[in-house]
Amino acid sequence: KGYIKVDGIEVPLEGEENLLQVIRKAGIEIPTFCYHSELSVYGACRLCIVDIEGKGIQASCSTPPRGGMVVRTNTAEVRETRRMTLELLLANHDRECPTCERSSDCVLRDLASRYGIDKVRFRKNREPRPLDTLSDALVRDPNKCVLCGDCVRYCHEIQGIGAIDFAFRGEHVQVTPAFGRSIGEVDCINCGQCAAVCPTGAIIPKSEINEVWNDLQDEKSKVVIQIAPAVRVALGEMFGLPPGEVVTGKMVRALRMMGFDRIYDTAFAADLTVVEEAAEFLKRSEAGEGPLFTSCCPAWVKYAEQSLPRQLPNLSSCMSPQSMMGSLLRHALPEELSIEPEHLKIVSVMPCTAKKFEKKRPELSRDGLPFVDHVITTRELGTMIRESGIMLDRLDADNFDLPFGFASHLGVGFGSSGGVAEAVLNYLDPEGCSGRIHWETVEDLSGVRKTTAVIGGKAFSVAVVQGIKSAAAIAKMVQSGEISLDLIEVMACPGGCAGGAGQPVDRTGEKRLARVKAVRSAAPAEGVRHAGVNPFVREVYTHMLGCDPGEGEAHRLFHTTYHS
Ligand code: HC1
Ligand code: SF4
C-alpha cells in the first residue's frame, strides 16, 4: 500500500513483489542479468542497484517495496558502480561480438553500449575455457558466461533437471554440468530453455545452417523442407514484424526462392498424429490400460526414458509429427521424384532445440537413412533468409505443396500448449468438442490444466502440462493413484512449442503470449477444422497405405519404441 518515490515521481504500490517491478512500472528500464520474473530471485549480478534514502546502494530485485521509500535510480554512484560491474564482466568475456550468434540480442553488448563503455580498465584473469560441443542440440561457450545463473535456475526450477550448476568458488566459479562433463553427457533433455534465458551467447542452439546450404548446392539432391506449426507466428520478428504476426505465405515464398524442391507443413503430420494417437487412445481405453501420455515433445520423451521407466508403456508409441512426416516422405518421395533414396534430403524448421536430438534417435530411421537429415530452428531459418538477401516482410504469399502441405486448424494448433489434446478430443468427438475446451488450473501445480471430456457417452479426464517439473509431479501422482487421468499432453517449454528455445530471442517471455494466441488462429479461415475432415489425411490411408489408422503399414511407418 502507499507510494514509492522513484526519481522524484510518486509510483503507487499495487502488490509488486520487489522494488525492481515498481521501478519498471514507472517506465525506467532497470538493467539486470539475473532477474527473471518466472524464476526465483538470485540478486547476484548487482546491475539493478539503486540508491534508497537512508539505506544506500541496494539491489532492487531483492528489496521488498515499502510505502514511503525514496529511490534514485541514476545517481553518479549508481552509474559508476554499474559501469564497474560491466567492465569486470567484459574483462573476462570473449569479446568476439561480430561472430557471436547472439550478437544482435546480447544483454551485455547492449548494456556496454548503453553505459558508454569505450574501454575496459581491468585485465583478464582467467584462462580461456574449451567450447562444449558434444550435445546434439546445444553449444556451451563458458568464455561468454556472466554467471547470472538464469540457466541454472531454469533447469532446476522449471524443468526439475539440474543438468547444470555453479561449481568452484571465488574467481574460479563457473556454470558447468556435473564433474566437468559435457552437457551432452548428462541428463540434459535438450529443451534449450537455458539458452533461451541466457543473456549472452554462453549457451546457444547448435547450428545446422551450413549443412542445409551444402545440400541445397548439391545438384544430385532434392531438398524437401517441413515447417513446424509454431514457426509461422515468430519468424516475422526477425524481420521487424510484431510477435504473433502470421507469416506462413511469405515464409513459403522465401523457401521457394532459396531453392527447396518441396515445402510441406509439419501440421499435416500433426493431423496424422491425431488420427494415430486417437486410435491408440481408444484401444487402450477399451482394454482398460493406463493413461496415455503424448509423445510429440522430444525433451519430455528423453526425460520419461531416463527418469520414469515405469511410465514408458503409457507413452504414446506415435512418432512426433516431425518424424512421421520424415518417415512418410522417405516412403513416398523417392519414387515420386524419381531419385535414389539417399539423394532425398529432408530438412525441418522447428521452434525447438530438442528436435535436433530427436532426429538422431536410431529408431527414427529406415535402411540407414534418418527420417530427418537436418533440423534448423526458427532463428536459423531467419538467418538463412537474411543471408539470401530476401526481405521476408516484403514478399507475397505462396502456398505449401500438396498433398503434405494441407493441415487442419487443430493440426496447426499443435504449436501451443493444449493443442495436441484439443485436436485429439475434437477428432474423437467433433460435435461435443467443437466449442473451445474449458481448461481448469490445478491447485498447487503450476503448469497443469485439466478438463473432463465426454466421448461416446464416456467421461475422460484430460490434463495438459507445460514444464518437465510439473510433468514429473503429475506422472508420480498417476503412479501412486493420487490422480486418475486418461490422456496427458506434455510439452517441456512454456506455452508449448510457441515458447520453444529455437524461436527468436524472448528472454523474459514477453512475446510468448502473442505467439500462443496467434498459433490458435494461424490456419487459413476457410480451412478444415480437424484431422478427420482433412481430405489429404484420408488419401494417405486409402491410397498410399491401404490400411486403417494404427494398423499395418501405418503402424510400421508412424510408430516407434522407447527404452530406459
Ligand atoms: Fe512442435 Fe510438433 S507442435 S512438437 O511443438 O507435435 O517443435 O511447432 O513441430 O513434431 O506439428 C515443435 C511446434 C512441432 C512435432 C507438430
Ligand atoms: Fe537444462 Fe534444458 Fe538446458 Fe538441458 S537444455 S541444461 S535440461 S534447461
Image: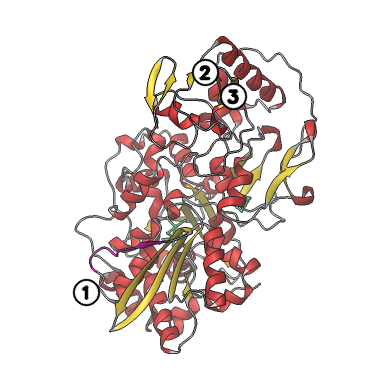
Where residue 21 sits in the image (x, y, percent)?
46, 32
User: From mark 1 to mark 2, how far is it between C-alphas?
Assistant: 56 Å
Q: Find disc 2 in the rendering and name its residue.
A: 114
Give the number of the disc on residue 529.
none
| Magenta segment boundaries in residue numbering | 434-442
Chief SS of the magenta region: loop
Q: Is residue 487 left or right of residue 35?
A: left
User: From mark 1 to mark 3, how far is it between C-alphas?
Assistant: 59 Å
Circle 1 SS class? loop
Q: Nearer the viewer, mark 2 or mark 3?
A: 3
Say how the picture is coloured. secondary structure
Three-letter amino acid code at the position of disc 3: Gln
In magenta segment, residue 435: yes
Give the number of the disc on residue 58.
3
Three-letter amino acid code at the position of disc 2: Arg
Q: Find disc 1 in the rendering and name its residue.
A: 431
In this rendering, the answer to whether 32 lies above or below 223 is above
